[in-house]
Every structure is written in C-alpha cells, then in structure tokens.
C-alpha cells in the first residue's frame, strides 16, 4: 500500500486517503505496509462526509518494542486534495 508524499518548501508530508486504507468501517488499530495505523471514530466520520479527504500521516513516539513496527495516527486533513487552491480577489 503506497502513501502519497507531498513536498512543500523542502518538507515532505505523508498523506493517506480512505481508499488507501481499504475503506475501513470501524475504529481501531490496523497493520499496513508503512506500520500500524490507529483510526478513530472521528476520522471515520470525516471520511463519511468527505470520502476523498486526505489525512496527514503522523508518527507516534516509539513504544517499548520498536521491533513491532512504527505507529501512526491521522492528523489534519484536506477535503479536496486534488482541487486547485482557493483564492479570493
């Protein structure tokens, strides 16, 4: 499973969509190719309202057993990642 990488001013930000995580329907901790991902009920509510939303993938601080893989959770999101930037004049 791939994770989109968006480069902004020399900073790489990982983004993940509902499709990329298999459109899970229950909150929980899921194993993916990039590590363990915790998805909350709130994350799922956002995806139900905005199915194309892309969340920032955030690494959680390492636990006592790093051999089990990295831990991630979802951060901020963009409801229309493919849309042009909004501008006002």
Image (cartoon, rainbow, N blue to C red):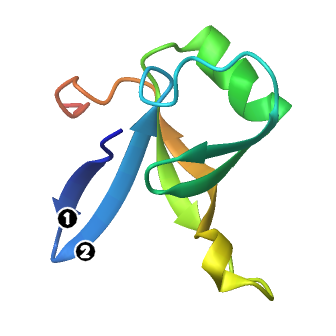
Is 89 above or below relative to 10? above
Question: What kind of element bears circle 2?
Answer: strand
Instruction: Looking at this view, name the residue that lies furthest to the front.
Output: 67
Q: Position of residue 86 (x, y in %)?
A: 26, 31
The image quarter containing residue 62 is: bottom right
For residue 50, say whether it is visible.
Answer: yes
Give the side of residue 84 with respect to residue 68, left or right. left
Instruction: Give neighbour class at mark 2: few <14, some 14-19, many 20+ (Cα, 10 Å).
Output: few
Q: Which residue is mark 2?
A: 11
For residue 62, say whether it is visible.
Answer: no
Q: Which mark is residue 8?
A: 1
Give the side of residue 27 with respect to residue 57, left or right. right
Whole-number angstrom distance, CA of label 1 to CA of label 2: 5 Å
The image quarter containing residue 1 is: top left
The image quarter containing residue 83 is: top left
**Along the line of sight, which residue is nearer the eye, 26 or 53?**
26
For image coordinates 30% across by 42% down, the residue present is 2
Q: Which mark is residue 60?
A: none
Q: Position of residue 79 (x, y in %)?
A: 45, 26
Q: Position of residue 87 (x, y in %)?
A: 22, 33
Give the side of residue 33 with respect to residue 84, left or right. right
For image coordinates 44% across by 50% down, the residue present is 33
For image coordinates 22% across by 54% down, the residue present is 6
Quadrant where the C terminus lies? Answer: top left
* CB within 8 Å, label 1 to label 2: yes
Instruction: Looking at this view, name the residue that lies furthest to the bottom.
Output: 64
């Amino acid at each position: 499973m791939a994770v989109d990488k968006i480069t902004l001013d020399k900073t790489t930000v990982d983004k993940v969509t509902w499709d990329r995580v298999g459109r899970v329907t229950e909150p929980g901790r899921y194993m993916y190719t990039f590590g363990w991902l915790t998805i909350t009920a709130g994350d799922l509510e956002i995806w139900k309202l905005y199915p194309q939303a892309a969340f920032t993938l955030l690494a959680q601080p390492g636990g006592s057993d790093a051999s089990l893989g990295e831990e991630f959770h979802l951060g901020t999101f963009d409801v229309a990642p493919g849309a042009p930037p909004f501008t006002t004049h």
